[in-house]
Every structure is written in structure tokens, then in C-alpha cells.
Amino acid sequence: KTVEGVIGGCIVSAFLATLGAWVLNWPYWWATGPIHGLCLALLGLIGDLTASMLKRDAGLKDFGDLLPEHGGIMDRVDSYIFTAPYSWLVLTVVLPWLKYG
């Protein structure tokens, strides 16, 4: 949750998403890959910050004790709050639209 972490996460996510888009032969992979990776990185950060805000507002240190010293299970999956719906939309609507017009 630092500026350096966000920048590094965005760069790595954009690179890996571009690689994945190329391997999977996405339409306009050179553009859709990095855009998708950047959006995933930023939405993951927003999900993490949202979970932290909810935890702080509830006065909790952790979301449970299933994973001691890790903030609970919610801290392991909080990035999916926003990235999962976004990815579903991209894969079921955006990419087919780009491919078939």
C-alpha cells in the first residue's frame, strides 16, 4: 500500500497480462493486455483498501483467525471484490465484441 508498490504492481500486472493476451491470442493483444493488467492492478488495490476500511470501521484487527498473523481469510481474497466482476465482463462482453464486432 505504498506508491512504489502500486507502480511496481501496475507494471508487473500490465506485463503479465500482455504476455497472457498474446499467448491466448486476444484481439489487439498489444493494447488489451496492458489495459486489462493495469485495470486489474488498480481494482485489486481498491478491493484491498475497501476491505481495510470496512475492518477499520468495524474496529477489527483481523477478519478472522483461520490464518493467524495474516489478517484472516478476507485479507487473502479482498482483491477479488472488484477484479472478479471486471474480469468476467471483459471476457464475456468486451473481448467477443472486439473479435466479432
Image (spheres, rainbow, N blue to C red):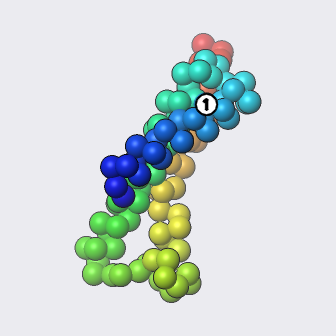
* Position of residue 25 measured from the top left corner of the image (x, y, whole percent): 72, 24
Count all numbered tags in the image, as a single digit.
1
* Position of residue 33 measured from the top left corner of the image (x, y, whole percent): 58, 29
Does 44 appear above or below 89?
A: below
Residue name at image x 51 percent, y 55 percent: 80
Would you say residue 93 is visible in this rendering?
Answer: no
Q: Amino acid at mark 1?
A: Thr
* Position of residue 15 measured from the top left corner of the image (x, y, whole percent): 57, 35
Residue name at image x 61 percent, y 38 percent: 16
Q: Which residue is mark 1?
A: 18
Please identify the quarter of the rendering in which residue 58 is found. Answer: bottom left
Q: Judge left or right: residue 99 versus residue 51.
A: right
Q: Quadrant of the N terminus?
A: bottom left
* Position of residue 3 measured from the top left corner of the image (x, y, whole percent): 33, 49
Extreme-top residue of the structure: 101
Residue name at image x 40 percent, y 43 percent: 7
Does 90 appear above or below 66?
A: above
Q: Of 25 and 92, which appears nearest the observer? A: 25
Q: Quadrant of the C terminus?
A: top right
Would you say residue 24 is visible in this rendering?
Answer: yes
Q: In terms of secondary structure, where does tag 1 sit?
A: helix
Does 30 appear above or below 6?
A: above
